[in-house]
Amino acid sequence: MRSHAGLQAISLALYNSLALKAMNPKSDIFQGIESSFMRFQRSIRRHESSWQKKSQLSLLETMILRFIVLEGPQKMKDVSSKFEIKLSTLTSVIDKFERSNLLIRKQTEHDRRVVLLHASKKGKKLFESYRTLLAQMFGQLKSHLPDKQFSHFVEAVFALHFAISDALPKSDTE
């Protein structure tokens, strides 16, 4: 019977071997990962498309609404900085939100020059329907995976987020 340390060494060697193969574009592992990413991306695009049809909001608009709903009232410049978009682009988005009664622009009491973006009840309700849709999607995903695999998936999503964020070049606005 092999020792625990021996099994760990074999497991690490196997992992290292797979990791090396995963970085070789000609390997079956690389091609399998690539294919899985493409299918995953296609599924996400279908989800986004479904949400866009229901809400009439783009992904960026949904992310802006999410930010304001979760973080509270925001200045335009802070929102444009957070999403690395020009103020002119954000103004168009906020105008659309106001026409749809999703957001309200309010001057602050202490300085009337400062305008804050507040989520309206309708905006909060729309955001909650988005969260419900996401929860349903995660529930479907969880129903197809054993608990341990779902936990690994969640950990991998967070790890990928940080790895990709660290790997991307910093923008001029940061």
Image (cartoon, rainbow, N blue to C red):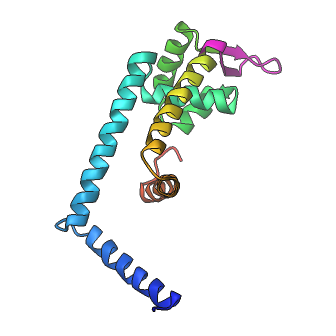
Return the residue nearer the eye: 72 or 105.
72
Compared across the picture, whether 153 is left or right of 121 comes to left
Identify the residue at horizontal 52%, vertical 26% (top origin).
Answer: 130
Compared across the picture, whether 80 is left or right of 108 comes to left
Return the residue nearer the eye: 37 or 112.
37
Q: Quadrant of residue 43?
A: top left
Residue 90 vertical position relative to residue 141 in the rendered view, above or below: above
Residue 16 in the image: x percent, y percent? 36, 78
Position of the N terminus by quadrant: bottom left
Which residue is farthest right?
110
Identify the residue at horizontal 28%, vertical 44% (top origin).
Answer: 39
Residue 50 vertical position relative to residue 19 in the rendered view, above or below: above
Q: Is residue 76 magenta?
A: no
Residue 101 in the image: x percent, y percent? 58, 9
Q: Quadrant of residue 49?
A: top left
Q: Quadrant of residue 116?
A: top right
Range of magenta residues: 105-122
Identify the residue at horizontal 46%, vertical 90% (top origin).
Answer: 6
Return the residue nearer the eye: 79 or 156.
156
